[in-house]
Amino acid sequence: MVPAPRLLIYVAFLVPLGLLPAIDPSLIPATTILVLLALVPILTDGIISRQCLNSIRTEIPTIIRLSCGRSGEIPVTINRQGTTPRKISVGLDLPPSIVTKKEIIQLAIDRDQEGLFFKLPVTATQRGRFLLSLIMIATPSRLGFWEMRQSRTLSIEIRVYPDLKAERKTMAALFLPKYAMGIHSRRQVGQGREFEKLREYQPGDSLDMIHWKATAKRHLPMSKVYQVERVQEVYVVIDSARLSGQPLHGTAGEQRLETFIKAALVMGMATRNQGDLFGLLTFSHKVDTFLRAKGGKTHFNGCRDHLYMLEAQSVTPDFRELTVFIRQRLKKRALLVIMTSLDDPILAEELVKSLELITRHHLVMVMVMEPTTAKPLFSDEQVTNLDDIRRKLIGHMQDQALRTIEQELRHRGVTLIRANNANLSLQMVQQYMSVKARQIL
């Protein structure tokens, strides 16, 4: 129980009554009786209103899904048993990363209304998993002298996912639910790699199309007919080690890992709409998460639930452990898109050596975040002071280091994609669509 404003005003009127004995000591008995009589409604109000909140029931979904940086809502249902109370104040003990403009909601329930439903507007400022563990309820007492308050424990999980609204707008045409369709119709190159059927030999068929065993069995030239692959496996491999926790080049807040996660989700949507199978693999000093490639919305939601809790770890990535795991677990040829950071020359050399284990069995692409300063020395002549010269020399060295890594990877059949924060998702989807069009998987 907390004193209400009415109680403070009521007590303020009783103060002069308590000063009467100081003027005339003979009024002490009468004043004492009057003060006790004045306290009766206050005490009575507190006693009869003590259990009034027990008839209030609150219901909140056990799982609440929000998008980082976008406004969302937390639905709350208030159920009332009996006729009182009719005025209720509700407040939620939100995590620091979940902000709201209305910390306390004032509700008025009609006499014939058993419950009330409202949505608390909130905004999530950070991706991840958070717990809502406390709800506070308050209502005035029956006579208004007290405010009855009660806190109740909750077990509500708030899942904050990355916001993909900007990526959806940028690549809206790439998410058409049609095979091999994007901004323009994509022509398939070649005859395909997937065996379809046997047919009789026709003039013009090449020797590699002849099925020699079937020809010998039937005593008739037979040719193999191939079709374009409709279902392919695509895996996104995310590095969550120490370098992924560093901020993006040119920014002070968002980590590289955040961009990796957004790009992975965009890739998952693109593969699902193109009819392919999408898989997920995250690693640091060991393989942390492995979801085998599947299709459908349920599998995509499962990948999303694994990604929203992914955090950068202060460990060194083990690329050898990653490639051994892939070699042992992935038997079918697949497209592997590895998103990592190669700022450390030692790690870059280790990646190049480790990829030799899987390049013969899978199609591998490596995507790195390119520094905004990584440019050839004489590509820009805007130099005004010594700091500009120093900065351009550093950018030239970064560009040369990436070019060296790109050349070494090309010799091993690996494509290095240098992207920035603005076009990482776009370049990844474009490379994927190019692979499908060229049938190189």
Image: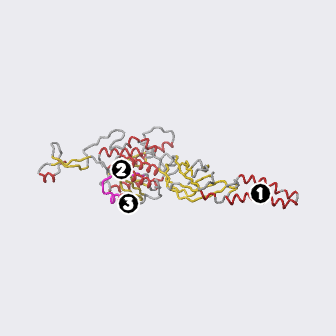
Q: Amino acid at mark 3?
A: Glu
Q: Amino acid at mark 1?
A: Ala
Say if the magenta span includes residue 332: yes
Q: Secondary structure at mark 2?
A: strand
Q: Residue 369 got which mark? A: none
What residue is pinned by disc 3? Answer: 321
Q: Amino acid at mark 2?
A: Met
| Crowd class of label 2 (few under 14; some 14 to 19; many from 20; radius 10 Å) | many
What stretch of residues is rendered in magenta?
Answer: 325-340
- Residue 129: percent from the left, percent from the top? 50, 55
Task: Return the disc, 2 or 3, that comes first in the chain's sequence.
Answer: 3
CB within 8 Å, label 2 to label 3:
no
Residue drawn at x 39%, y 51% is: 297
Give the colour scheme shown: secondary structure
Residue 180 in view here: yes
Q: Nearer the viewer, residue 184 or 109?
A: 109
What residue is pinned by disc 1? Answer: 38
Task: Return the disc, 2 or 1, that comes first in the chain's sequence.
Answer: 1
Please give left or right for residue 172 compared with residue 68 in the image: left
Residue drawn at x 13%, y 48% is: 221
* Residue farthest left in this picture: 219
Calculate the distance from the C-alpha at mark 2 to the C-alpha at mark 3: 18 Å
Q: Secondary structure at mark 1?
A: helix
Calculate the distance from the C-alpha at mark 2 to the C-alpha at mark 1: 83 Å
Q: Nearer the viewer, residue 357 or 269?
A: 269
What residue is pinned by disc 2? Answer: 365
Q: Secondary structure at mark 3?
A: helix
- Residue 269: percent from the left, percent from the top? 39, 47
Say if the magenta span includes residue 42: no
